[in-house]
Image: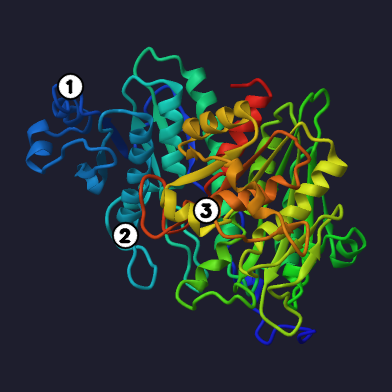
Amino acid sequence: MPGSSRSAQADETALPVIPTAVVEVDVVRQRRSGVPTAVLVPKGESGADLEAAGEALGVDGGVLESLGFTAAAGEVLAVPQPRGQFGWVVGLGEGEPKHWRSAGAGLARAVRERLGDSVDEDGDPQDLGDAHDAEYVQLRLPAADGQRVAALALGLALGDYRFRVTREPAAPRLRKALLVPADGADVEPLRAAVARAREWAAATALTRDLANAPSNVKTPAWLTELAAGLAGEVPGVSAVVRDEKWLAEQRFGGTLAVGGGSVSPPRLLEMTFAPEGAERHLVLVGKGITFDTGGLSLKPADGMHLMRTDMAGGGAVIAAMLSIARLQLPVRVTALVPAAENHVSGSSYRPGDVVRHYGGTTTEVSNTDAEGRMVMADALAYAADRLEPDLVVDVATLTGAAKVGLGLRTGALFTTDEDLGRRLRAAGERTGEAWWPMPLAEDHVDDVRGDLADLRQAPPGPGGVVAALFLREFTAGLPWAHLDIAGPARADKPYAEVVPGATGFAARTLVELAADLAGER
């Protein structure tokens, strides 16, 4: 075995507070005096109505036009106001929900930039009038439905998310946004939409936090125990963390094999939410590889640092579970996160090994860098055998093939159940997460059959397809969907409400899936 402790263990107290606070968004019936104002401007068929926008901010519409404001989605222009204050005009483009999301995110970033200008290099306030009042902002809404207002709230909450491990004091940021509907609008449906969006944002932000946390702190024990602690704060949720001894007793061979090369032993997190009267049981399984070197099939050094986010699927499952419980959705949910660190040492598992999973199925290892399916197989088999689910959905940063095929903004969706696939795609559409249906091509079923063992872990063939077919072997014929988020789990540049780093992708879809199953959509 490798040494008994890390040589340079980080101080976890240096991490930011988890979960990260996001912008609070509320709907109010009328404007508040003294609070900086932003005006949302759609392009409209005849162009942007800059006269009305200028009137709302006390400037001539021609000034906005001369400054080049076009009302493109997410475009933000700061407008000086009396007594050193600022207002903003914010473009809604053609007014689709995704444009409202971009508008909210653009405004949150613009406010951060304005607040950043109000402190000096030591972090102390400068004399820039009432700039700090912009920690609160109110937005005048054109006529809008709940879907668009929810998208706006999501963009405001997440567009300026930041996770930094630093000694510097936290920078000032937008703390609260007040949405002021058009005269005569029914406020209550908009408030309900914003409340739903707040939970989407909370789930996304927590997923980002967990995935962004550095892996010298984020061991399997840290991840699962933190999640169990957060579960203890939410009524109705219970959580248990299984250690390596329990995993050995229960023969979680895939999880033990992957985690065997690390000084940080593997864990299994099991979270349960079982409200009274719930008729359906949804099981969520999330890949929890807290760092992935590739094992003996070592990854190239370039880009390996990003493997701290290789538990993004597990993070999405944890965060979605907590939001489902806070919303008190009447559906039973169990979340499983098999957590391990895929490291290199004398005790690492090897290509050519035969591993026995929970339930007895054996797998011949082809490539130790295909570790995600090894731990997921144990958890899926355990779910099918012990938990009596009606539906199973797993989420994982599983294959580079999915990333190559679909890029960085779309998740791959494989499913054995057409209705489940439809529900997942619709949930993603409502929450701003795109899923593309992929085939479970039966022509490749024989590829995952083994000669030395029951199955082959990483056979030749289309990488995403054969990985999904491998996982299907452990689902006992249950209605099942596999979400491969290898591409959209990380971003290298900002767009809409996404910022560089972990994106939190899939968490919102899972929350909305549960709402749909509960009959609340």
351 up-or-down from 451: above or below: below
Element under label 2?
loop
Q: State yes or no: discs 3 and 2 in contact (Cβ < 8 Å).
A: no
Residue at mark 3 to residue at mark 2: CA–CA distance: 53 Å
The residue positioned 51% from the left and 73% from the top of the image is 304
**Residue at the far top in the pictured view:** 184
Amino acid type, residue under disc 2 in the picture: Ser
Q: In this view of the protein, can residue 173 be seen by the observer?
A: no
Residue 118: give its label. 2
Q: Badge 1 is on which residue?
A: 45
Mark sitting earlier along the chain (1/2): 1
Circle 2 residues within 10 Å: few <14, some 14–19, many ≥20: some
Which badge, 3 or 2, comes first in the chain's sequence? 2
- Residue at the right extreme of this rendering: 249
Depth check, mark 1 against mark 2: the one in front is: 1
**Residue 464 falls left or right of residue 183:** right
Percent of width and height locating residue 484: 56, 49
Q: Nearer the viewer, residue 199 or 1?
A: 1
